[in-house]
Amino acid sequence: MSATRSIRRRTFVQAAAAAAVAAPWVVSSTALGKAGAMPASERIGLAFIGPGGRGTELVREFCARGDVQPLAVADVRVEVRQRVGKIIEELMAARANRPGYRGVDTYIDFRDVLQRSDVDGVVLAAPEHWRPLMCIMAAKAGKDVFSEKPFALTIGEAKAMVEAIRRYGRIFQHGTQRRSNNEWRLRDSCEMVRNGRIGKVTHAVVSVGPSPRPDVPEYSFQHNPPPREVFDWDLWLGPAPWRPCVHRGPVPGWQQFRDFGLASVGNWGAHVLDMAQWALGKDAEGPVEILPPGADGEHLTIRYADGVKIVCPRTPGDSAETVVYGTAGQKIIFGVSPEKVKEKFDPTPIGPNEIRLYRPKNNDHNGNWLECMRTRKPTICNEEVAYRSGSLCILITIMDRLQRPLKYDPVKAEFPGDEEANRLLDTPKRAPWTLY
């Protein structure tokens, strides 16, 4: 147990003892760890930042765990703060069998959450343009981080995130949960590929949707932003370029615009490209070349130093298909109909001396992060894994903008001798959001 947690435990026990003298019924058996419950002093204190759609799902998932103590919610929208705060209090009341539960604070500004010493980790589900800076600031504040995908919008952001997580010794988990839950027997299929059941791997085929487009809003219908306590427009924009408030809330479809998201490339692409990386054994390396359609076949192609490729047919919207091909067969990894691709592989079970991939306890992605927060061991989707898979999404968007072959140095994270492409490796951040 860390010194910080030991201090917290002593503080809690002292407070509980004092409360028991004054009013013994105040401290519940659940808080003290009786009836099989984890005592409050040993639970991990979490805060939820930007819990919209997917973020609300994460709130429900984490609050269902007895080893978690939800402490705070931060969002620039009053509707979200109130709704999610109420959800947490209802879930905690049911969990503790104590109607009228209170104990969750709500904030407009996430920086107020980061100042709290009782928050051990933050769950980031804010818009994509915000997550890198939030992650860096949380790491600097001593918080472990669970962040939704995609990892970052630029290579510069991604590099800075990895550096901050490692510099401050934080535990990071990326929201590519299919590695943990083994959906479609993903892990089992990747193990078969890694152990030569389709021969020597030659390439993967990963269908990917469109890249984000430039934001060209209609500014003729400008509105004055709502009051800050209702919706903080300036804070929602954060590091993105300033623009007038044209709606009473976030930019509609923000994920589809280059300043705010990676569109389908970062939505489902973050998952399927990550699955290909795992199957190909590329978690610690990046590609050396990105080729547009027609340069090396019909589709956009990502090539690694050993010649292995990821071929990316493009789809009009989100897509979730990954297949790996080898010299002796092919294996569906995720989302492809057997009628579309006929599998061929050696069905021999994986032996005890063959490659075994990371297996979280109970296939529990969220639990893996919490366990690693205690052990300080790397998670299944740690910052290196997230950086490598996330880089593929970013490189595809750069290719889509330039539409020409690109040579890439995955060690230096740059396009050698290509000034035009290198200018797209990062974007300026609006003051004061310049942390790196």
Image: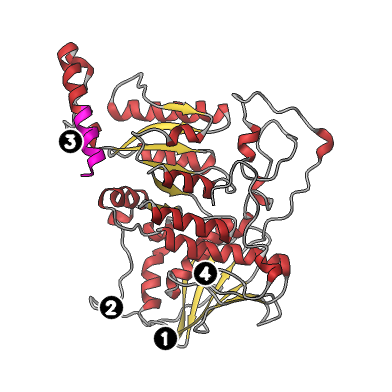
Q: Which residue is mark 2?
A: 354
Q: Amino acid at mark 3?
A: Gly
Q: Is 21 on the left or on the right of 67, as rendered? A: left
Q: Residue at x 43, y 72 (%)?
A: 279
Q: Is residue 30 visible?
A: no
N-terminal label among 2 and 3: 3
Q: Quadrant of residue 301?
A: bottom right
Q: Is 286 on the left or on the right of 184, as rendered? A: right
Q: Which residue is mark 4?
A: 322
Please identify, in this view, whether the residue under mark 2 or under mark 4 is nearer the observer.
2
User: Residue 424 location in percent, x, y?
Assistant: 66, 62
Q: Which residue is mark 1?
A: 199
Q: Is residue 5 magenta?
A: yes
Q: Which residue is mark 3?
A: 36
> How busy is the neighbourhood of tag 4: few (under 14 within 10 Å), some, or many (20 plus)?
many
| Cα–Cα gap, marks 2 and 3 | 39 Å
Q: Residue at x 47, y 44 (%)?
A: 137
| Cα–Cα gap, marks 2 and 4 | 23 Å
Tags 1 and 4 touching, CB below 8 Å: no
Question: Element type at marker 1?
Answer: loop
| Cα–Cα gap, marks 3 and 4 | 43 Å
In the rendering, which numbered label is found on residue 172?
Answer: none
> How busy is the neighbourhood of tag 3: few (under 14 within 10 Å), some, or many (20 plus)?
few
The secondary structure that most of the magenta stretch takes on is helix
Pick the residue in front: 217 or 323: 217
N-terminal label among 1 and 3: 3
Q: Is residue 47 above or below residue 155?
A: above
The quadrant the N terminus occupies is top left
